[in-house]
Image: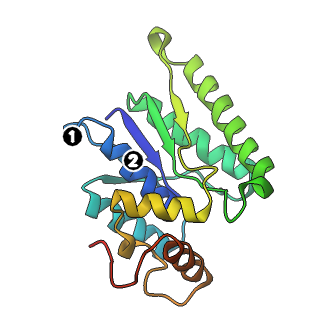
Amino acid sequence: MHTLVLTDGGLAGLVAAVIASKRTDPEIRPAVLVPSGLSEPVSRAARVGCERLGLSAIELNAGRTGGGAGETRLLLVAAQTAAQNGCSTLIWGRQLGGDDPVQSIDLIGQSLDRATLISRLISLDLPDSGSLEIELPVIDMTDAQLAELALDLGVPLDTLAWWGSDTEERTRWESALRSVGWHPDSVFA
């Protein structure tokens, strides 16, 4: 296992998992870290999405993960897990762009800084001058950009926790998906 993916259980995490699986050796499949603090429906959906993609889901116990310090702890534990498993890459499936990435620029910058610093910190302890790269491939995408990428990659949308529910999350993503040409009858199964 050379790549791990850290998911939030949402569309960004599932897109990151597909990205990782498409660019790695088919014999060495990436695994997905599912934080233990996610709600049961989101955690279950993340595991079903991994199963549908043929990827292993690994529970990641990082304690409380809300807010800045919790986010740092989550990423640090994920990076330590990646390093302990001999991975050279951790892909963080995080998206903060929303409708307008400019409004989220400070949060995006903080996430990028956090990833850079933790990557460097973990790399200091790796043998033979090894390194762990933390990538955030969708961090600054708008909802429409992420939706379009999800459609292009064939992400199994029906595995997401909001699928089939009546929530703000579903309304948000259906709107983004429709804006890039998706129709509700075109589910990727």
Q: Residue furthest bottom?
A: 166
Location of residue 116 (image quadrant): top right
Kindly identify the residue that appears in the image at 33 percent across and 77 percent down. 187
Considering depth in this image, is 13 or 149 the residue closer to the camera? 149
Mark 2 and mark 1 lie on one chain; the one further toward the N terminus is 2
Residue 137: x, y in percent?
53, 44
Location of residue 141 (image quadrant): bottom right
Residue 111: x, y in percent?
69, 44
Distance Cα–Cα, label 2 vs label 1: 13 Å
Q: Secondary structure at mark 2?
A: helix
Kindly identify the residue that appears in the image at 45 percent across and 51 percent down. 16
Q: Is residue 151 left or right of residue 108?
A: left
Location of residue 52 (image quadrant): bottom left
Considering depth in this image, is 108 or 186 the residue closer to the camera? 186
Kindly identify the residue that appears in the image at 50 percent across and 18 percent down. 126
Residue 54: x, y in percent?
24, 55
Query: Quadrant location of the N terminus?
Result: top left
Q: Which residue is mark 1?
A: 26
Q: Residue furthest left?
A: 27
Q: Which residue is mark 2?
A: 19
Q: Secondary structure at mark 1?
A: loop
Query: Quadrant location of the C terminus?
Result: bottom left
Residue 117: x, y in percent?
68, 29
Identify the disc placed on residue 5.
none
Considering depth in this image, is 97 or 162 the residue closer to the camera? 97
**Colouring scheme, one of rainbow, by chain, secondary structure, one colour:** rainbow
Q: Amino acid at mark 1?
A: Pro
Q: Which class describes the residues within 10 Å of circle 1: few (<14), some (14-19), or many (20+)? A: few
